[in-house]
Image (cartoon, rainbow, N blue to C red):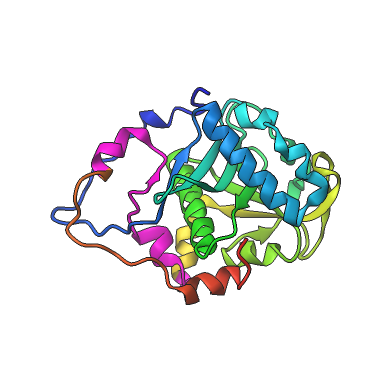
């Protein structure tokens, strides 16, 4: 499977001297680039949707057109201990052509003529660190959107899962609590939510968000979404940071594992 968006062209130049604090994760997040890895991501998403949306489980047992669409990519989290696939997320963008979701976005949203990243097929396997996997995938999403100058991130969320997105700062594109049926997902009614990529950092800082440090300040070499800087990530760091606390994770994601 060939790369969908040329992330390799993006470079990073360290601006601080001395040791840079880094946070090591118990898993690695990469962009899916092979059929083998895509198959592992599909297995994770099908298993997850079988629990929350059983009517979609069989449909999601196979690759979808969006998995291979230009300027669309799939993220895969794999455990360091045994290489098991433990989480996945698909990011669809409107860089080259409109997204299906744009037909549902109201004109009053201010997202017309904006670059968008539509987050779909989020799946996390049940583990003790499931919440950490989820927030790390969202950190990868946010960093990717910053680098690619994506204006806003858009999600659809069925209650009660919508509460997690709201706690991350996503806002309703319609009036609060309004549910919109999604035609290509068996008409499942969901909330349509968005988060401005470049305002997210300001909002998280202004509200003293419990995950601000991890999302913005912490350097995670295990989030390997830009191949061109992998050499930089392998260098030893002067100091080691800490993972977000269980209290911070639960304040956003609650006690549910996914």
Q: Locate the C terminus and report the quarter of the image it occupies.
A: bottom right
Question: In the visual, does 228 lie left or right of 146?
Answer: left
Residue farthest to the front? 82
- Count of numbered circles on the image: 0
Quick one: 206 or 221, which is closer to the camera? 221
**Position of 230 relative to 187 (above/below):** above
Residue 116 in sight from this viewpoint? no
Question: In the visual, does 240 lie left or right of 68?
Answer: left
Percent position of residue 33, x then y: 49, 29
Q: Is residue 231 magenta?
A: yes
Percent position of residue 238, x then y: 17, 58
Quick one: 149 or 63, which is closer to the camera? 63
| Image point (20%, 46%), residue name | 235
Q: Is residue 246 magenta?
A: no
Q: Which residues are magenta?
A: 206-232
**Position of 255 relative to 153 (above/below):** below
Residue 24 in sight from this viewpoint? yes
Percent position of residue 256, x then y: 63, 68
Question: In the visual, does 10 lie left or right of 138?
Answer: left
| Image point (62%, 31%), residue name | 67
Quick one: 63 or 204, which is closer to the camera? 63
């Amino acid at each position: 499977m060939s790369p969908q968006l040329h992330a390799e062209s993006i470079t990073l130049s360290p601006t601080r001297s001395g040791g840079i604090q880094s946070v090591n994760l118990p898993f690695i997040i990469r962009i899916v680039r092979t059929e083998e890895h895509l198959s592992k991501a599909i297995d994770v998403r099908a298993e997850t949707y079988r629990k929350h949306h059983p009517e979609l489980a069989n449909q999601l047992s196979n690759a979808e057109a969006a998995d291979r669409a230009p300027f669309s990519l799939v993220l895969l989290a794999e455990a360091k201990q045994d290489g098991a696939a433990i989480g996945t997320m698909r990011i669809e963008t409107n860089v080259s052509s409109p997204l299906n979701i744009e037909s549902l976005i109201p004109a009053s949203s201010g997202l017309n003529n904006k670059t968008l990243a539509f987050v779909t097929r989020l799946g996390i396997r049940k583990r003790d660190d499931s919440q950490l996997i989820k927030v790390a995938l969202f950190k990868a999403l946010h960093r990717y959107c910053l680098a690619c100058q994506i204006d806003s991130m858009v999600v659809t969320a069925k209650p009660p899962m919508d509460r997690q997105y709201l706690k991350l700062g996503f806002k309703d594109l319609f009036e609060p609590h309004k549910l919109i049926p999604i035609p290509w997902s068996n008409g499942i009614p969901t909330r349509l939510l968005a988060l401005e990529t470049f305002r997210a950092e300001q909002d998280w800082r202004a509200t003293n968000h419990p995950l601000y440090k991890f999302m913005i300040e912490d350097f995670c070499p295990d989030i390997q979404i830009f191949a061109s800087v992998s050499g930089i990530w392998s260098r030893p760091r002067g100091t080691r940071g800490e993972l977000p606390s269980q209290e911070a994770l639960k304040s956003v994601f609650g006690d549910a594992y996914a």
